[in-house]
């Protein structure tokens, strides 16, 4: 795990988390190895959740959503200049 978790993209973190889950489910690791991977998995899950929250915030900002409700305004087309 040379790269810091916070430097991973969402996709990289999710792929590593899936690998960790597979390894833990096999049940072939000793307790220390399992705990180390479990701790990394928790950190990766938190990182993924933060990335999703960040993306949701950007989408809400782009859509003009505030407090869970979309803000609307009447469409006002620009007048064509002749």
Image (tube, rainbow, N blue to C red):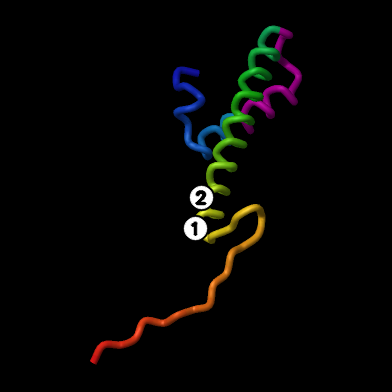
Q: Is residue 82 above or below residue 30?
A: below
Residue under pointer 1? 62
Residue 45 in the image: state x and y as whole percent. 63, 31
Residue 77 in the image: state x and y as whole percent. 41, 82
Q: Is residue 69 above or below residue 36?
A: below
Could you say which disc has been placed on residue 58 in the image?
2
Query: Of 55 and 38, which appears nearest the observer?
Result: 55
- Say whether residue 27 is left or right of residue 14: right
- Say whether residue 61 is left or right of residue 35: left
Query: Of 36 and 77, which appears nearest the observer?
Result: 77
Numbered disc total = 2
Residue at 76%, 19% (x, y): give it: 27
Residue at 54%, 42% (x, y): give it: 54
Q: Is residue 17 above or below residue 40?
A: below
CB within 8 Å, label 1 to label 2: yes
Asked whether residue 79 is drawn in magenta, I would say no
Which range is magenta? 17-31
């Amino acid at each position: 795990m040379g790269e810091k978790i916070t430097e991973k993209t969402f996709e990289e973190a999710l792929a590593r988390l899936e690998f960790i889950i597979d390894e833990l489910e096999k049940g072939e690791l000793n307790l220390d190895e399992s705990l180390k991977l479990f701790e990394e998995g928790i950190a990766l899950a938190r990182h993924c959740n933060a990335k999703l929250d960040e993306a949701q915030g950007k989408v809400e900002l782009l859509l003009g959503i505030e407090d869970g409700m979309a803000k609307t305004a009447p469409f006002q087309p620009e007048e064509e200049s002749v």
